[in-house]
């Protein structure tokens, strides 16, 4: 029982870390490109099932209308919470808005 609890806590921590990393990526990109957070109109992540992993792409849209993909990487299913995994399994693709 204790082992299950520890594994559950670690898995939950990994999920929180993934979404926090995405928010931090957007914030860092804004700073590196000289934008204030007020310039950000929308940030979102698109998750796609692939054969061996999940592809994660992060996008931003700025007040001036510019839209850009700022990150693409592969992640493991373990980095996602069960609800997100289930939604991704149903459609093969998922888009989620990111809040800073």
Image: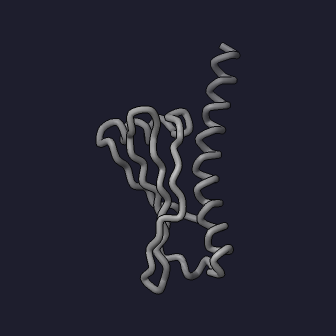
- Work out whether residue 53 or residue 10 is closer to the camera in this orientation and state it: 53
Q: Is residue 65 above or below residue 78?
A: below
Choose top left, top right, bottom left or bottom right for residue 51: top left
Q: Is residue 13 left or right of residue 98?
A: right
Residue in the picture at 46% in, 56% down? 45
Residue in the picture at 65% in, 46% down? 17
Residue 55 at x, y = what percent?
45, 46
Q: Is residue 80 above or below residue 37?
A: above
Residue in the picture at 51% in, 44% down? 74
Residue 79 at x, y = what percent?
56, 38
**Figure disc tally:** 0
Position of the C terminus by quadrant: bottom right
Choose top left, top right, bottom left or bottom right for residue 88: top left
- Work out whether residue 5 or residue 77 is closer to the camera in this orientation and state it: 77
In the picture as drawn, the residue positioned furthest to the top comes out as 1
Residue in the picture at 46% in, 36% down? 53
Residue 37 at x, y = what percent?
61, 77
Q: How is the image coloured?
A: one colour
Q: Is residue 7 above or below residue 72?
A: above
Residue 93 at x, y = what percent?
34, 47
């Amino acid at each position: 029982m204790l082992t299950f609890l520890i594994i559950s806590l670690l898995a939950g921590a990994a999920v929180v870390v993934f979404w926090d990393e995405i928010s931090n990526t957007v914030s860092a990109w804004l700073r590196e490109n000289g934008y204030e957070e007020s310039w950000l109109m929308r940030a979102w992540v698109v998750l796609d099932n692939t054969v061996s992993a999940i592809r994660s792409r992060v996008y931003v849209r700025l007040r001036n209308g510019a839209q850009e993909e700022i990150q693409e990487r592969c992640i493991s299913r373990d980095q996602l919470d069960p609800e997100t995994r289930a939604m991704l399994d149903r459609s093969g693709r998922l888009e989620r808005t990111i809040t800073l």
